[in-house]
Image: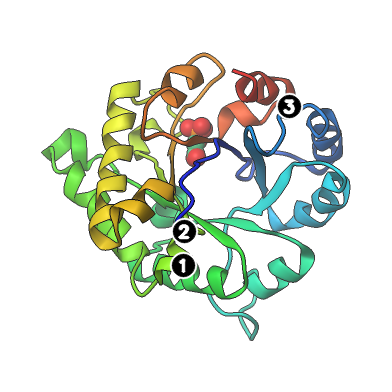
């Protein structure tokens, strides 16, 4: 039996923006002002430097602390990388994998993203896989194929049971950090396509249960229209998550 209630998910992705003195005031400002987890889940994905203090300060609250990235080995001689096993032992329960900036600036390809998915799953961390449409859509009108192939690659060798632990985010690069949001209809088109792809790989029941997110210039102003779309179960928010008050406005759209 697959439960099909898709609880809305609102994730902040701080990227490399916030400085140490901003982190504790931020978590303190939001931690008791978010919806109950049965209504919506709220995550902050932060640099590894901040995860430990965030986890400490998020205790006794419903804020989920996530990683922005990790390595696909559990331990070893990989200087500068972050171990998914260590993340799990520290209490991290979600991690982004394959964000557009990782794919673009750090050459992460579909195979690496799939390895990260497996590393996270074996360490009981739920992967949030980002599918980047790049500029392909606008330049060649072939964005559709691009998104589908990334979804298929991310789920390679992932069991039905583990697929249910994953979230997929539709994140067209032309909308990330540019202030150009996909319209609600464009975002819905991308998210619906991802759900159809999951349905084809697994089953309609699994596709109905997996949460699909949209990311790219989401703000307190446009979030409602996005969240009203049938296939958009949540959002990943960069710029508009950097100020706690703006993020709270967005959460309480
Ligand atoms: P943005 O970033 O909200 O600044 O466009 C979104 C993301 O990278 O997930």
Residue at the limit of the structure toward the bottom, as seen here: 76
Cβ at disc 2 under 8 Å from ligand 1: no
Q: Secondary structure at mark 1?
A: helix
Answer whether labels 2 and 1 touch (C-beta < 8 Å).
Answer: yes
Q: CA distance from mark 3 to mark 1?
A: 35 Å
In this rendering, is residue 207 above or below 240?
A: below
Query: Which residue is labeled 1 in the image?
Result: 161
Which corner quadrant holds the C terminus? Answer: top right
Tell me: 133 left or right of 232: left
| Crowd around label 1: few <14 · some 14–19 · many ≥20 (10 Å) | few
In this rendering, is residue 74 above or below 171?
A: below
Q: Secondary structure at mark 2?
A: loop
Residue for point 64% across, 77% down:
79
Query: Which residue is labeled 3 in the image?
Result: 244
Cβ at disc 3 under 8 Å from ligand 1: no
Determine which of the numbered discs, if any, sits on residue 164 in the image.
2
Tell me: 207 left or right of 53: left
């Amino acid at each position: 039996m697959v439960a099909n209630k898709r609880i809305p998910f609102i994730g902040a992705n701080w990227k490399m923006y916030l400085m140490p003195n901003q982190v504790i005031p931020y978590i303190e400002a939001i931690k008791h002002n978010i919806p109950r987890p049965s209504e919506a889940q709220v995550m902050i994905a932060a640099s590894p430097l901040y995860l430990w203090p965030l986890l400490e300060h998020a205790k006794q609250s419903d804020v989920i602390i996530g990683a922005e990235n990790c390595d696909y080995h559990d331990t070893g001689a990989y200087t500068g990388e972050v171990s998914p096993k260590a993340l799990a032992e520290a209490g991290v329960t979600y991690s982004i994998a394959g964000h557009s900036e990782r794919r673009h600036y750090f050459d992460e390809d579909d195979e690496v993203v799939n390895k990260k998915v497996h590393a996270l799953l074996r360490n009981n961390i739920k992967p949030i896989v980002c599918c980047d449409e790049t500029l392909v859509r606008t330049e060649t009108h072939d964005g559709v194929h691009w998104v589908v192939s990334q979804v298929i690659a991310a789920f390679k060798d992932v069991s039905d049971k583990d697929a249910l632990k994953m979230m997929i985010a539709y994140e067209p690069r032309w909308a990330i950090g540019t202030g150009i949001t996909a319209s609600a209809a464009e975002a819905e088109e991308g998210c619906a396509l991802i759900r159809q792809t999951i349905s084809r790989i697994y089953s309609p029941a699994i596709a109905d249960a997996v949460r699909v997110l949209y990311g790219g210039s989401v703000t307190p102003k446009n979030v409602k229209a996005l969240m009203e779309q049938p296939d958009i179960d949540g959002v990943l928010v960069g710029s508009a998550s950097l100020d706690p008050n703006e993020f709270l406005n967005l959460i309480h759209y």
